[in-house]
Amino acid sequence: MGSAEPNDARPFLPERPSLTALREAVQGCRGCHLWRGATQAVFGEGRKRARLMLIGEQPGDKEDLAGKPFVGPAGRELDRGLEAAGIDRADAYVTNVVKHFKFEERGRRRIHQTPRRFEIAACMPWLEEELRVVAPEAVVLLGSVAAKALLGSSFRVTRHRGELLDSDLAPILSATIHPSAILRAPDDAARSQERAAFAEDLRVVAQALGR
């Protein structure tokens, strides 16, 4: 880890943080070592004044290459769940807690690695600015990494998924599984069950938003 990496993204934030300025500045972020292996930073995407923000863990292989969040297999599951819940993804803002892809190489494949606590903390200023600029009415945390990062290490998605939670993050807050968990289900029946449960969790938020 080089001396130019302070484990804090704040020195790299733009002076006037609009979404456009943040999206440009994040490409120069050297707040932690994860930039070294990644193709690029993957910033959030969506409407500036979106009522709904969806927050995942980090970009995956496809996202790292495309520079856009949730465009790989997990992204397709997210799209499917949103459609089932009556939510147009184009009306939402989609992002991740960590902006660079953390992985290990196995042959020609790049295998996702869960970011560590200090990597999450280093990257958090970017997400804090996204929340401040977009000011969503509702936030959905996708998966345990995002949920623990924003609600504390004791939070359990399995215990509270689909519930409306009290938090200063947004007037409406909920947590559910990361859509990649659907892909890891052992068989078609389990995947179908997970898809239905995921869509129902999103539907709770849609109803709270009055959709």
Image: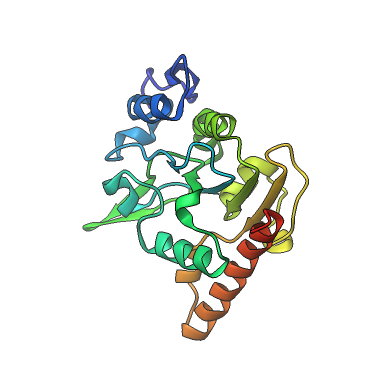
Q: Is residue 31 above or below residue 111?
A: above
Left or right, 199 with reference to 102:
right
- Viewport quadrant of the N terminus: top left
Q: Residue furthest front?
A: 211
Residue 29 picture location, percent across and down: 38, 26
Residue 61 picture location, percent across and down: 32, 53
Q: Residue furthest top?
A: 15
- Viewport quadrant of the C terminus: bottom right
Q: Residue furthest left?
A: 108
Residue 163 picture location, percent across and down: 74, 59
Q: Residue furthest right?
A: 166
Name the colouring of the figure: rainbow
> Is residue 91 visible from the viewing direction of this image?
yes
> Is residue 152 visible from the viewing direction of this image?
no
Q: Nearer the viewer, residue 138 or 34?
A: 138
Residue 186 picture location, percent across and down: 48, 79
- Identified at 44% across, 30% down, the residue is 19
Left or right, 31 with reference to 156:
left
Left or right, 76 with reference to 61:
right
Q: Nearer the viewer, residue 120 or 188?
A: 188
The quadrant where residue 33 appears: top left
Q: Is residue 147 above or below residue 182?
A: above
Left or right, 26 with reference to 166:
left
- Identified at 65% across, 43% down, the residue is 137
Q: How many numbered callouts?
A: 0
Q: Is residue 176 above or below residue 124?
A: below
- Identified at 72% across, 48% down, the residue is 154
